[in-house]
Image (spheres, helix red, strand yellow):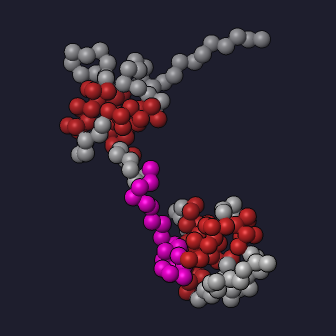
């Protein structure tokens, strides 16, 4: 036998309109979009017929996520659902190089090598980035950025890949 619902969700017209506005907004991230849709489906005043497990299956989340959304709404309000708070311990928050810094690093690496050197090394890029960028970036971060972009400091090409010769069968 299932346990009775602990929290009953009754959204006001203002809250429902804010949820719909967040859902229709094209800049809303996927996480907030799913949270808003789940909360909208849990609304008792609309006549919620689905169980938490059915809602979790519909939106491809675990049932604990549905419970967490309900708990956040009851304890913190509608703003906790609409606003996405990223954890300071997440991988995205721990990134040292943002998009602007990555672009600058790639621009430096694709440019001509310094005098006296035939190509860029990670150590040279680290020294140059200290001068050019506001925040110092480690060699490992530079290596990850260049690996992600499929370009390296030792590439002799300008970023254009040579065509491979294929045999005609």
Q: Is residue 133 left or right of residue 155?
A: left
Q: Is residue 164 visible?
A: yes
Seen in the picture, residue 45 relative to 22 is either above or below; the reply is below
Quadrant location of residue 60? Answer: bottom right
Q: Quadrant of the C terminus?
A: top right
Report the number of discs. Answer: 0
Q: Residue at x 32, y 18 (%)?
A: 119
Q: Is residue 54 left or right of residue 14?
A: right
User: Which stretch did the figure color magenta?
Assistant: 72-91
Q: Is residue 133 magenta?
A: no
Q: Residue at x 76, y 78 (%)?
A: 2
Q: Residue at x 59, y 77 (%)?
A: 70
Q: Is residue 158 left or right of residue 62?
A: left
Seen in the picture, residue 165 relative to 32 is either above or below; the reply is above
Q: Quadrant of the N terminus?
A: bottom right
User: In the rendering, at what x and y percent does residue 118 appear?
Assistant: 29, 15
Q: Residue at x 61, y 67 (%)?
A: 65
User: In the rendering, at what x and y percent does residue 163 appear?
Assistant: 57, 18
Q: Is residue 23 visible?
A: no
User: In the rendering, at what x and y percent does residue 129 appear?
Assistant: 26, 36
Seen in the picture, residue 115 relative to 108 is either above or below; the reply is above
Seen in the picture, residue 67 relative to 117 is either above or below; the reply is below
User: In the rendering, at what x and y percent does residue 120 appear?
Assistant: 31, 22
């Amino acid at each position: 036998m299932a346990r009775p619902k602990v929290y009953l969700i009754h959204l006001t017209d203002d809250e429902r309109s804010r949820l719909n506005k967040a859902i229709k907004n094209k800049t809303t991230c996927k996480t907030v979009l799913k949270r808003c849709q789940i909360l909208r489906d849990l609304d008792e005043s609309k006549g919620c017929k689905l169980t938490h497990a059915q809602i979790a299956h519909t939106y491809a989340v675990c049932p604990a996520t549905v419970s967490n959304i309900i708990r956040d709404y009851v304890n913190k309000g509608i703003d906790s659902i609409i606003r996405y708070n990223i954890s300071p311990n997440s991988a995205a928050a721990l990134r040292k190089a943002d998009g602007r810094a990555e672009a600058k690093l790639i621009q430096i690496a694709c440019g001509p090598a310094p005098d006296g050197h035939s190509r860029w090394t990670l150590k040279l890029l680290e020294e140059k980035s200290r001068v050019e960028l506001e925040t110092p970036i480690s060699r490992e971060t530079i290596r990850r950025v260049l690996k992600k972009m499929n370009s390296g400091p030792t590439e002799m090409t300008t970023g254009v890949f040579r065509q491979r010769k294929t045999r005609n069968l």
